[in-house]
Image (cartoon, rainbow, N blue to C red):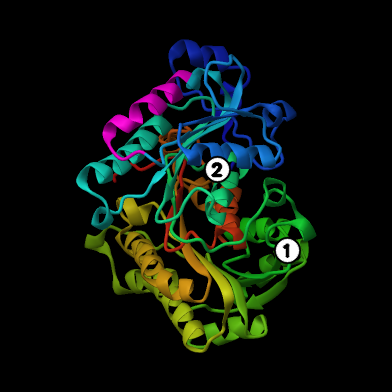
Amino acid sequence: MKDTYLDLVNGPLKQIAKTLGLPQPVKLQRFGQTPAQYLSAPVLVLGTSPGAQRIADRLLENDFEVRRHPGSGESLRAVIAVFDDAREPDDLSQTALELGASLRSLLPCARVISVSQALRPEGQDPEEAATAQAVTGLTRSLAHEMRAGSTANGLLLDGVDVDAASATAALWFLLSAKSAYVSGQLLTVSSTAGEEIRAAEFVATGDAGPLAGRTAIVTGAARGIGAAIARTLARDGAQIVGVDMPQAGQALAAVMNEVGGRTLQLDITSDTAAERLAAAVDNQVDILIHNAGITRDKLLANMDASRWDSVLAVNLQSQARINARLGEANLFASGSQVVSLASTSGIAGNRGQTNYAASKAGVIGLTAASAQAFGQRSGSINAVAPGFIETDMTAKMPALTRQVARRLSSLQQGGLPVDVAEAIAFLASASARGINGQTLRVCGQNMVGA
């Protein structure tokens, strides 16, 4: 849905909004919208560790302009603050303060990325664990301070170094316009799995795209976020099998005709859903996107069994059953990747959505518990948790409620379905297999109620 306020404060009401101290969200630069001036601006890499230099070298190898010392006076497209060798709180000071001094040099819609060790209390002494967690607090707080559409996110290294394939892929994602609505988030890389990918390959499309040669099943593909997922995965080179209920057949056919995909009319809660999905891709499921979901909102005091059971059946139980049956029947291809739709409601809760929040929290738990099995097949399973996304559902909200919800994130605007799709496309790529069992929030750093 069109955000009229966003258009006005970037147009005729810009000065008035500034004078009155009103929110001034900036139109985000999404994939294909990045100006040449931004792409030619340098990336500043901070930190004194060998890992920081290896990141700088990797950027140079991929045709980025790179600076290693602050204070050049140039406008920056990004700052990468590398804390990978920090073992005690004092180790954070120099790089953190250099990062702070560089923030005023950022272009609109710039990126800040921290790189640090993941928290592993069982393998770290107390000071080391405290330092690891301190970087998380720094990153999330900085994300709240970013301005003009810029974001701050973190890359956590869990038993791997900065050269891991998925660590590099995560950098390409977080540096790119594909992560426009991701802020305040930490991506954990926990294995050396994943295929190496160059920055140019990461942003390529069609037959040269990062999903070329692979087939993706997308449930709930007829409209909204599901249709955006289908379009984005097809843009990145995947062949699409779109799945939806028979009553959505016409809308599903329109989307699949647009992306050159195949349709499968299916109730995903049926006992034969897993087998029919596998049959649609010749019994080798490569990429599976669990997007289908419903809401049946009601206060718990007024909740009936129909509302509760239907939401849990579609949003959670169908995913668990399909994953289990495909796994038991060896219908997942080697290197298969699953991405499921969770929600920030499953993390923070939401009034009147106990059933929905329970189902989406369950998806997060299912994802984490399934990671080992997918890793043993050289694959991965992850979840994406959208926040306030401009869809037909949010368009039905009362106007004032909708405006307030848009301004509650650090980016002061709602996300678009394509923002969710971009995160899913990244997590479904072969280069991201070292990210496993994680839930990535796509919410503009909107975590009210957590």
Q: Is residue 299 left or right of residue 85?
A: left
- At 59% from the left and 85% from the top, the residue drawn is 276
What amino acid type is highlighted by mark number 2?
Leu
Question: Which label number is shown at residue 174?
Answer: 2
Residue 151 x %, y %: 50, 34
Dot 1 and dot 2 residues touching (CB under 8 Å) = no
* Rendering coords of residue 367 (x, y %): 41, 67
Per the rendered image, the range of residues in magenta is 86-101
Q: Quadrant of residue 22?
A: top left
Quadrant of image for the N terminus: top right
Does the stretch in magenta take in 91?
Answer: yes
Residue 222 in the image: state x and y as whole percent. Answer: 63, 64
Q: Is residue 431 visible?
A: yes
Q: Is residue 104 above or below residue 119?
A: above
Structural crowding at the residue carrying mark 2, measured as other residues with C-alpha within 10 Å and reported as few (<14), some (14–19) or many (≥20): many
The residues bearing labels 1 and 2 have C-alpha atoms spaced at a distance of 21 Å
Disc 1: which residue: 212
